[in-house]
Amino acid sequence: MRKWVYTFGGGVAEGSRTEIDQLGGKGANLAEMAALGLPVPPGLTIVSDACGLYYKNEKTLCDDLKVQVLQGISGIEAATGRAFGDTSHPLLLSVRSGSRTSMPGMMDTVLNLGLNDHTVEALGHHSGDARFAWDSYRRFIQMYGDVVMGLDHEVFEEILEDEKARLGHELDTEMSAVEWQHVVKLYKDMLEQELGEPFPQDPHVQLWGAIGAVFSSWMNPRAKTYRLLHNIPEAWGTSVTVQTMVFGNLGSTSATGVAFTRNPSTGARELYGEFLVNAQGEDVVAGIRTPQSITEAARIDSGSDKPSLEKLMPEAFAEFQAICDRLESHYRDMQDLEFTIERGKLWMLQARAGKRTTKAAMKVAVDMVSEGLISEQEAVLRIEPSSLDQLLHPTIDPRVERHVIGSGLPASPGAASGAIVFTAEEAVEAENEGRKVILVRVETSPEDIHGMHAAQGILTTRGGMTSHAAVVARGMGIPCVSGAGTMRVDLRNEKLIGLGVTLTKGDIVTIDGSSGQVLKGEVPMLQPELSGDFAQLMVWADAARRMTVRTNADTPGDARAARSFGAEGIGLCRTEHMFFEGERIHVMREMILAEDEAGRRAALDKLLPMQRSDFTELFTIMHGLPVTIRMLDPPLHEFLPKSDEEIEEVANAMGLEPGFMRRRIDALHEFNPMLGHRGCRLAISYPEIAEMQARAIFEAAVAAARETGAPVVPEIMVPLVGLRSELDYVKAVIDRVATEVMGEAKLEISYLVGTMIELPRAAIRAHIIAEAAEFFSFGTNDLTQTTFGMSRDDAARFIPTYQRKGIIIQDPFVSLDFDGVGELIRIAAERGRRTRPDMKLGICGEHGGDPTSIHFCEDVGLDYVSCSPFRVPIARLSAAQAAIKARA
């Protein structure tokens, strides 16, 4: 019989953290803590393979699994001295999800399972607190009714709010046992009225219903969205952990909380977290009550007048502090912990690697190296490369005056400006229209995940540092201010009311996730710098990597930014981008509209000094580093006006008849221009264009070499080559011009001529093309287009549908398709080097900044990757991680 269930508790465990794929993060770490002898309520974990079987069996639990679950519960009964469903000393259970990768709040949980009209009386009698028992029962009905039976939780919230208003209560804690008993009756009546069935009284029916619901939540919309955003495979499934309930809502000596062993925002080595007295776990993250600080130092910093856990329950705090130190040392990483104190007794409910801002991750990694916990290479592997975006975004200029209209908690650092929206749907709509927005909510929930991803930043008026908004924003790397209690959201009238100001939807605000301030209007920002822990980690990364990292840069500004981020040259300079500015576009149009070669050459003579100046500046900025310049690539019609109004305006400016211009535009029209007259085909049809560009490059190389005293080695890239004969033709033009310029300047310039591999034919015939090409640069944007036969400009319309339906996992224009496009790259690399062993190989498509794609480049043995300037640090770190893993 397949083993579906692993038990833990009482100092022993059947599983461990090495089995995280099957036990999930929660189950694996509970087993680990139990084996370490820590106070963990006994329980069992159903393996994630059972999730796949559940769906295969049309959402039915198999008999073998049920038998093993019941055997596990018998073990829990023996360990606790309680019996499941017993009417004198009942065992109550929690049922929770646990993917191998943390997905906070995305799946469902059921607490207090096992309560019914009889066991609630027993719980009240045994605990000596009838109010606690009936409060737990109403929580169970509300949670089970929502998660398992499908009645929206807001229905229960409305009943509760109405009752509190009728009784004159403001807080749930003011409700008496009798009042909770009445709420339970109202809940059960509503369930039967709405669903046509009574609330189940049989604890075993409740158990199977809860386990099935947790498995089902793996496929709920928010979980699907989260997996899509974080590239988590659907096939992984979720495990289910069934565990003894312990209660933080058993009066003033009970509490529940969430803590990090280090500050998740800054990385400082200090215990950081929140707790609530007389509460259950969901109360802390829901933001219903204002949580209290765990340490006295944190209480003082926050200005709270509510006692810290350190002062309120010193013995439990001391034990918890010791456990924090032990777990961090054991796991050698910052931990995110959940705990409950039941009448003075501490229980550990969860340990996992804590989600943190990238700034904090950097500090923790660097500090742990100095503390001797991890090595420098382990520190490099600890940082998620894509998360570096958090450190590459603007912050508010400290010199500007701040018009503060509210403040809250600095939940996720960085700053963002945008128009106010109040719903996730509005945020998504704005993103689709290219508008930047700040999502403003009273508090966020997992259903808001799509809007949170679309927004520039998040502002909530309720919730703490461990609220849903705070945790998710930190994971996404977007700024967040939570718990802005000085502000009020009026959803009905779509207003945000702050200090002396009322804003409406569409008004601009700025949030500072580092200070917790909310500012009116848009505020000037500062660009980030690579310094401190960031710089130290990059030193370690650079020492570990094999590939070099270049940048895609078309302007001096791009080149300077990239160099400041550590770029080791330019891997792609798109010369056509230099033709769109100011007077240049007019000259370019003169060249295109010319009726003969003489007319084209006259226009090109005007463009030559402009191109030469651009290249000279790029060579100077990158002195001593390689610069790859791609010759003119796009079809000529892209430089011409489109609408009748634009045509008439341009024709008048150029002294031409609008009718003549329309005829020339019609003559250049192509049915599929991305596969038409572009790239090397332009240079073959109009060699004078290639001549002008080559002359500009070589004259610039001469000027830069004389100015800087450093050698300049241009790498000239011929685009869209499919035939060696194409490259031969264009290379002959380049070589001839190079000889002319060097003769005129009496200066020898070393240079390379290569091609961009962006056609399947070029990849397959790479061994032949390599006879003429001195380097290959893989243009993976177009190679993906031509391999799949789909336009990257149009694919966004249907790729999400493919992902939702499981046809593809990742967008191939974002992360390289290893099996198809990747195989062509591998073929081209192998065949090219077979002909020319010292051939330089690189990648310059958007994939050059994608961490997953960079690992593939390391595997293939490319020499460099090239990416946009602000992705250079991401590429440097990814290349280092790829090299470390390749050597492991």
Image (cartoon, rainbow, N blue to C red):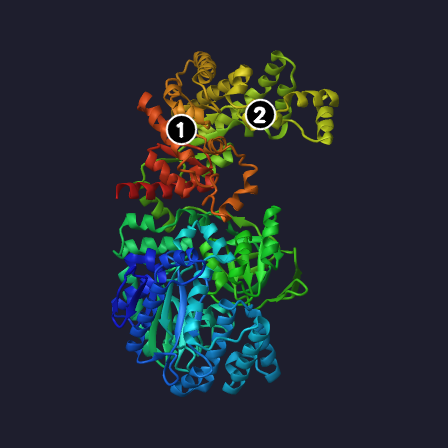
Please tell me the numbered disc located at residue 359.
none
Closer-to-camera residue (154/667) = 154
Quadrant of the rendered image containing residue 42: bottom left
Residue 91 in picture, x, y percent from top left: 37, 78
State the SS at label 1: loop
Amino acid found under the numbered disc labelled 2: Pro
Packing grade of label 1 (10 A; few <14, some 14-19, many >=20) is some
Residue 148 in picture, x, y percent from top left: 49, 68
Say whether disc 2 or disc 1 marks the residue closer to the N-terminus. Answer: 1
Closer-to-camera residue (700/408) = 408
Question: Can residue 18 be spotted in the picture?
Answer: yes
Vertical placement of residue 185 versus 272, above or below: below
Please tell me the numbered disc located at residue 635.
2
Q: Which residue is denoted by mark 1 in the rendering?
A: 626
Quadrant of the rendered image containing residue 539: top left
Vertical placement of residue 708 versus 684, above or below: below
Residue 727 in picture, x, y percent from top left: 45, 18
